[in-house]
Image (cartoon, rainbow, N blue to C red):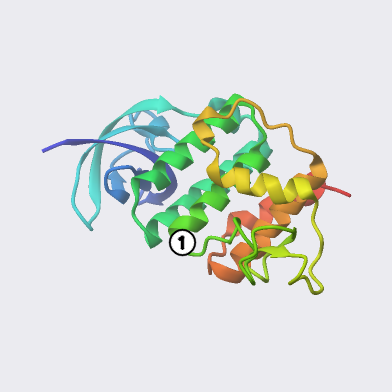
């Protein structure tokens, strides 16, 4: 029996002379590994639809916890604009890798939906760094390590918030402030908005470079400290960020 499953290719690897094994993140079953027989052959119908970032309906013989067999793919979006830009490709590659890791921790359909919504907005031309940070923040909920962004993480005070600290786990008020680096008031307000925003409904992302830098630095440090997730694609992305967020 052939099943039709919506998903996106997050990883591909060669298998023997002409085939591939692809890893697909799906809404229904989470992560599925599929054998794409003959997909590396020049004339194969599967050649162009089994590449990383192909988003579509996958027709396959599904085997739970085993290698499934791919039959065909109806492409929904191949994200052509992302693939034209090395910076966008780098962000998208990181997000695919991150989503796969988060899904391994906790299978929820929302993890998939958030990824697709983010990639669509990057494809439309919105700032990939800001979108990446929004998704990173939302994913912390599924990893069980969400920072405290509605009160002081130390004393619970909801007023006089002075800064944002990865070491302290979120907001820090004036009373609890020790030697934490002070971030701008806009950063304090905006990161909370990141958590609540509906990515699919974003129509504008006009954020000052210094604010973007503060939020990105916080999330990088927070992930390093609390998640145990270390991705190869992140190192390359950090090099891009250092170039783009100078100052």
Q: Which residue is drawn at 79% across and 69% down?
A: 180
Residue at the limit of the structure toward the left, as seen here: 1
Q: In which quarter of the image is the N terminus?
A: top left
Q: Mark 1 points at which residue?
A: 143
- Answer above or below: position of 193 versus 154: above
Q: Image check: 196 left or right of 204?
A: left
Please tell me which residue is depicted at 63% across the width and 64% down the height of the picture.
222
Residue in front for this viewpoint, 201 or 55: 201
Label 1: element kind: helix
Q: Nearer the viewer, residue 81 or 163?
A: 163
Name of the residue lying farthest toward the right: 247
The image position of residue 64, as x and y in percent, is 19, 54
Residue found 48% across the figure and 34% down from its top? 117
- Residue 233 pos. (x, y %): 60, 54
Residue 209 visible in this rendered orientation of the protein:
yes
Residue 65: % across, % down: 23, 58
């Amino acid at each position: 029996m052939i099943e039709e499953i919506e998903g996106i290719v997050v990883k591909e690897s060669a298998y023997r002379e002409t085939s591939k094994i692809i890893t697909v993140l799906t809404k229904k079953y989470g992560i599925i590994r599929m054998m794409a027989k003959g997909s590396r052959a020049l004339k194969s119908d599967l050649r162009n639809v089994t590449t990383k970032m192909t988003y579509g309906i996958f027709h396959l013989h599904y085997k739970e916890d085993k290698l499934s067999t791919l039959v065909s793919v109806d492409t929904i979006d191949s994200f052509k604009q992302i693939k034209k830009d090395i910076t966008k490709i780098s962000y998208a590659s990181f997000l695919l890798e991150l989503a796969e890791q988060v899904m391994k921790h906790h299978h929820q359909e929302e993890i998939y939906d958030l990824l697709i919504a983010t990639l669509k907005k990057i494809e439309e031309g919105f700032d990939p760094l800001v979108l990446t940070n929004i998704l990173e923040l939302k994913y912390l909920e599924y990893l069980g390590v969400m920072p405290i962004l509605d009160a002081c993480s130390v004393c619970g005070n909801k007023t006089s918030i002075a800064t944002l600290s990865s070491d302290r786990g979120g907001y820090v008020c004036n009373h609890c402030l020790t030697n934490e680096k002070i971030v701008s008031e806009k950063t304090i307000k905006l990161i909370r908005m990141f958590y609540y925003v509906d990515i699919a409904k974003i129509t504008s992302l006009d954020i000052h470079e210094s604010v973007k830098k503060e939020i990105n630095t916080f999330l990088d440090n927070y992930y390093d400290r609390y998640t145990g997730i270390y991705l190869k694609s992140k190192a390359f992305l950090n090099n891009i960020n250092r170039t783009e967020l100078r100052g």
